[in-house]
Amino acid sequence: MLQLSKKIEYGLIALRHIASKVNDSIVTSKEISDRYHISYELLAKVLQKLARAGIIISYQGVKGGYILARQPNQITLSDVIQAIEG
């Protein structure tokens, strides 16, 4: 059986949440953390790694947050694992 780390699990939760937003609405890490009751600090680090890998796009500032960089069906589990775990 495949065991996923907490980081991978948080990454998948975040990607699912971001993908569920209509019209590419920007999603904040605080929104995801509060919605799923997960560690904000760890989630923020995971989202940074996903952004560096080009899976999500990060917007800075007061109205900042994240959107998907590509269509959800173009993101594989392997992409997520590689981005987060290396």
Image (cartoon, rainbow, N blue to C red):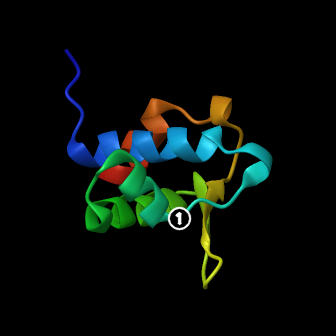
Residue appearing at x 48%, y 59% in the figure: 31
- Could you tell me residue 27's position as x and y percent? 59, 59
Quarter containing the N terminus: top left
Residue appearing at x 46%, y 63% in the figure: 29
The residue under label 1 is: 28
Question: Which of the 4 image quarters holds residue 60?
Answer: bottom right
How many numbered circles are shown? 1
User: Residue 86, can we see it?
Assistant: no
Q: Is residue 3 above or below residue 81?
A: above
- Could you tell me residue 20's position as x and y percent? 63, 38
Residue appearing at x 45%, y 32% in the figure: 77
- Could you tell me residue 52's position as x and y percent? 51, 65
User: Residue 13, can we see it?
Assistant: yes
Residue appearing at x 44%, y 54% in the figure: 32
Q: Amino acid at mark 1?
A: Thr
Question: Which of the 4 image quarters holds residue 2?
Answer: top left
Q: Residue furthest top?
A: 1
Q: Is residue 20 above or below residue 27?
A: above
User: Relative to 4, is 27 on the left or the right?
Assistant: right
Q: Secondary structure at mark 1?
A: loop
- Could you tell me residue 26's position as x and y percent? 66, 61
Crowd band around label 1 with a 10 angstrom C-alpha radius: few (<14), some (14–19), many (20+)? some
Q: Is residue 69 above or below residue 74?
A: below
User: Relative to 79, is 5 on the left or the right?
Assistant: left
Q: Residue furthest bottom?
A: 61
